[in-house]
Amino acid sequence: MLEIINAPAPVRPEACADIDPKAAVLMGTLQGCCHPRALRLKARLATCRCGDPLAALQAEVAHLLTLSFGPVEAARRLQALQ
């Protein structure tokens, strides 16, 4: 059976004008990631403000970076958060 999955629209820069700075850094770490979940995570980060949802998204980003690029590159990309 064929299933059609609607992908989220790409995140536009004007939509990120009031984005949380930590979320913006997390979005930057996903640059060059071709994993299907990367676009969805960027969309969720663009609407996330702060607190627990942002911490959960940070864990998801770290996991996705590790899957896509390996643990060393994921750690290097996440150094910007520290």
Image: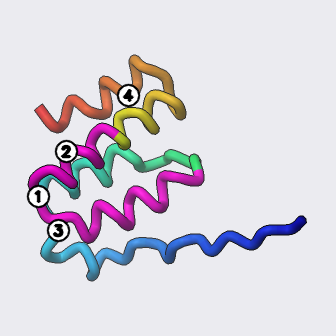
Q: Secondary structure at mark 1?
A: loop
The amino acid marked with disc number 4 is Ala
Query: Which comes sooner in the sequence, label 3 or label 2?
Result: 3
Question: How far apart are labels 2 and 1 at the CA level?
Answer: 8 Å
Tag 1: amino acid: Cys
Q: Position of residue 6 (x, y in %)?
A: 63, 74
Q: Secondary structure at mark 2?
A: helix
Q: Nearer the viewer, mark 4 or mark 1?
A: 1
Residue at 16% in and 37% down: 81
- Helix, strand, or loop for circle 4? helix
Front-most of 27 and 3? Answer: 3
Do the numbered discs 4 and 1 sit on residues whose CB atoms are within 8 Å? no
Counting residues from the N terminus, which is met first, the one under dot 3 or under dot 1? 3
Relative to 47, does residue 38 appear above or below in the rendering? above
Picture quadrant where residue 61 is located: top left
- Residue 47 sits inside the magenta stretch: yes
Residue 76 percent location from the top left of the image: 31, 25
Quarter of the figure with the C terminus: top left
Q: Disc 4 designates what residue?
A: 74
Kindly identify the amino acid type of the residue bearing the numbered disc 2: Ala
Amino acid marked by disc 3: Ile
Q: Is residue 28 magenta?
A: no
> How packed is label 1: few (under 14 Cα within 10 Å), some, or many (20 or more)?
some
Residue at mark 3: 19
Label of residue 50 in the image: 1
Which badge, 2 or 4, is on the more N-terminal residue? 2
